[in-house]
Image: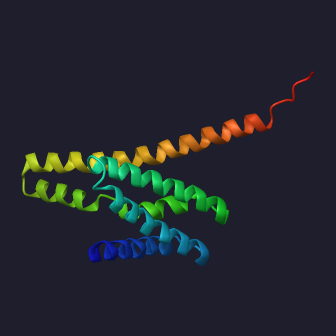
Amino acid sequence: MRTEIIQVICAVIGSFGFSFIFHLKRDKLIVASVGGGLTWLFYLLVVHRVNGEFAAYFLATVFATFYAELMARVKKAPATIFVITALIPLIPGGSLYYTMEYLMQKDMEMMRSKAAETAMLALAIAMGITIVIMLLDLFSLVTRAVKHRPAKKC
């Protein structure tokens, strides 16, 4: 339990660092940083309940993207600033590092394995963002169509 708390705190700090680099204003900086911590907390909650890391990364990305879209509406800011910082903890840096390490050691079998793992995690992140944005755009399109539908004449 203690390890998970430290991981979430580190996720907040890491997201804060990127928020700071992006020159976010104080109110957005805090919301974006908390998004990174919540995303990692969500990942930790689902990783042992789903089948594989791909699914955990996908679900955590879906959570982060919904969070970013919600905060974008609340803070009246682009969702991009919130989604990028919320996804910082999910970047598969360790997997990419080991891919490069095995490449330098000329262990091609392990390098291919780690490269495939890295690509799958990146794909999970990309799919999570894309699906949420598509669903929200579809929802927006439908609600606008219903709102602007001409009244029936009797």
> Percent x, y for residue 113?
15, 47
- Which of the pair 106/9 is nearer the observer? 9
> Percent x, y for residue 7?
32, 72
> Percent x, y for residue 91?
34, 59
> Percent x, y for residue 140?
66, 42
> Which residue corresponds to the image point at 32% horizontal and 77% vertical from the top-left?
6
* Among the 4 quarters of the image, the one containing residue 135: top right
Instruction: Classify 81 as above or below 34.
Output: above
Quarter of the image with the C terminus in it: top right
Quarter of the image with the N terminus in it: bottom left
Instruction: Classify 94 as above or below 10.
Output: above
Numbered-mark total: 0
- Which of the pair 26/63 is nearer the observer? 63
> Which residue corresponds to the image point at 61% horizontal and 60% vertical from the top-left?
72
| Residue at the farthest top position | 154
Compared across the picture, whether 44 is left or right of 85 comes to left
> Which residue corresponds to the image point at 28% horizontal and 61% vertical from the top-left?
93
Q: How is the image coloured?
A: rainbow
> Which residue corresponds to the image point at 30% horizontal and 52% vertical from the top-left?
49
Compared across the picture, whether 104 is left or right of 144 comes to left
Compared across the picture, whether 55 is left or right of 112 comes to right
